[in-house]
Amino acid sequence: MEKLANLMKYESEQMEREFAKASACGKGTPQEVADFREGYFHGFIRRYFPFPYQVAKGNIGGFFMNHSSDSIDCIICNPIHPHTVDLSGRYSLILAEGVDSAIEVKPDISKKDELIRGLHQIQSVKKIVRFDPLGHQLKLLEAYNTLIRHIHTFIFSITTVRGKS
């Protein structure tokens, strides 16, 4: 267990450096900086969820497509998700039934507006109810049914300390 803790400590330090590098090198728009951070985060997630899991970005839709989430930074698609990747390499359709987790990446949630925006994006995912015909037929325990029918969501953040200008 100590080896895993040490590995996670190293990974978190590396991620802090990469996020700081994105800010320091961010000569372009804030969106370019965010894209760099999200790209690094996707690579990190791919190391822990290798093929046949897929990592995507975009809007998640339910089976009946009656609700779609806001754009989510990092989506972990499980092996049953259909390969709906277009020619540009982006998912053209992300179905809630094939999503294990949705992660919103925010660099600094000590800023109230960033935290509120992240929570709003996560709430849009929580409004989606996955199709589960067995859950209805078997009338499973409510807690289990909730676990199966809703996507696990997270906000990932590295809060930075700003130096004096």
Image (cartoon, rainbow, N blue to C red):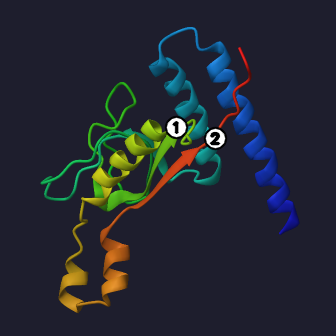
Q: Evaluate if marks 2 and 1 touch, with contact meaning CB atoms under 8 Å apart.
A: no
Q: Give the quadrant of the C terminus.
A: top right
The residue at the far top in this view is 27
Q: Is residue 135 left or right of residue 57?
A: left
- Name the spot of residue 103 as percent of width and height, x first: 47, 49
Badge 2 is on which residue? 158
- Name the spot of residue 89 as percent of width and height, x first: 40, 30
Q: Nearer the viewer, residue 82 or 23?
A: 23
Q: Amino acid at mark 2?
A: Ile
Q: Nearer the viewer, residue 9 or 40?
A: 9
- Name the spot of residue 45 as percent of width and height, x first: 59, 47
Q: Is residue 149 left or right of residue 116?
A: left
Structural distance between the alpha carbons of marks 2 and 1: 12 Å
Q: Is residue 10 above or below residue 139?
A: above
Choose the circle earlier in sequence order: 2 or 1: 1
Q: Amino acid at mark 1?
A: Lys
